[in-house]
Amino acid sequence: MNNKKKVFNPDYNPNGAEGSLDTNKLPWIPLTNVDGLSIKPVRASSESGMFSLIFKLDANSSFPTSIYLGGMDLLVLSGQLSYEQDGEESILAPGTWGFIPANSKVNSIKAIDDCEVLANFYSGVAFLDEKDSIKSILTSIDMLQLAKNNKIPLVPNSSAECWERGPEEAYDGPSEPLTIASSNAKALVSSDSGSVISSNVTHPHFVDTREIPWLVMPSMPDVGLKLLRVSEETGFVSMIVKHNGVALPHTHIGASDFLVLNGALGVRSGPPEGYGPGIWFYEPAGARHEATQRVTDEDLIYTANIYGPLVFDSGPGTPVEAVVSWLDYKTMAEESDVKLAPNTNLNDTSLLAWAPL
């Protein structure tokens, strides 16, 4: 075995094996236990149990009643969903973002028309039958098996793993592009960028991202942020980013993931034309960027989940110039009066089993 492959690569220079996946080139894989539901898996961790995917729900189909064993965040990419909970209904149109806390029981999520949704599951989800008994559980192991069966190379979970695997053959099976690949996806999150059906949100865990203002950090005036959720418990931050400048050299102390919605992202050893809508990235903890920028004149807009601090400097070996963490994003939201999605649902009594004291 080549000993070089065993060496941790602190500069995250994996010889072109970028931690990204073009979801437009993936097929929709039906889930046999839920009618009308298909997925494109992009990441699954056998260590944490977290997994990420894009799902498609056919018109008039529904997620069954479910209990989320960990949190789940989502962004509606196309179509409309009806979310019913606590006797109220929300209409989730394209551009709606939401966070469902751990242990939440959700009665139903129904597709009004064909829908495509980006979703990150922090643990498994239990699907229930009509009697509220567990019918099946969807976990990261299922994602790993689905990817293996369909020969889909999921993104690596660590810098070392990316370094060890080296360049891999790309998926070359049947492909079904996302709707956003051929539409004005900027309109999902910007109210001045075309017509998109408005959401009717009555539940506090969902927000229409077009109604959230772009915030700017003084150190990065060409980067706008729509802050969605900040967890003081985990340090996780969710946001939409408009990235029209060049990010300073930085290291991801915690991991992060992105989905490009508009424009083209230039990063590391990627192609000169950059990465466009539908490209999903996972930056493992320790990943480093000497420069990240747009490579066209279009606004570069992407989703972002940040799972730890970012450390900025002037280049390899130079002193740390700034550390940006959840504290900074929380302060930005408070100073700008941005209402963040709540991290818990204290009124939820949905656990399947309990032990009396």
Image (cartoon, rainbow, N blue to C red):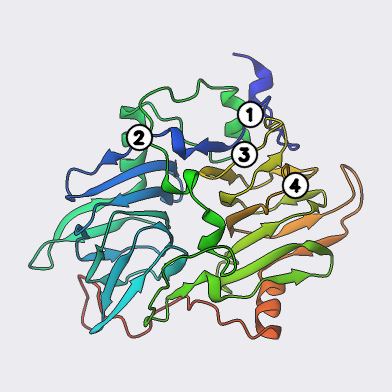
Tell me which label, 4 or 1, sits earlier in the chain.
Answer: 1
Tell me which label, 3 or 2, sits earlier in the chain.
Answer: 2
State which mark lies toward you, 4 or 1. Answer: 4
Question: What is the x, y in percent for residue 63?
Answer: 23, 60
Question: What is the x, y in percent for residue 131?
Answer: 7, 68
Q: Residue at x 62, y 69 (%)?
A: 226
Residue behind mark 4: 293
Q: State if disc 3 and disc 1 touch (CB < 8 Å).
A: no
Task: Find the distance from the CA under tag 4 to the CA under tag 2.
Answer: 29 Å
Q: State if disc 1 and disc 4 touch (CB < 8 Å).
A: no
State which mark lies toward you, 1 or 3. Answer: 3
- The residue lying furthest to the front in this view is 194
Quadrant showing the C terminus: bottom left
Which of the 4 image quadrants contains residue 270?
Answer: top right
State which mark lies toward you, 1 or 2. Answer: 2
Q: Secondary structure at mark 2?
A: loop
Residue behind mark 3: 275
The amino acid at mark 1 is Trp
Residue behind mark 2: 27
The amino acid at mark 2 is Pro
The amino acid at mark 3 is Tyr
Tell me which label, 4 or 2, sits earlier in the chain.
Answer: 2
Task: Find the distance from the CA under tag 4 to the CA under tag 1.
Answer: 23 Å
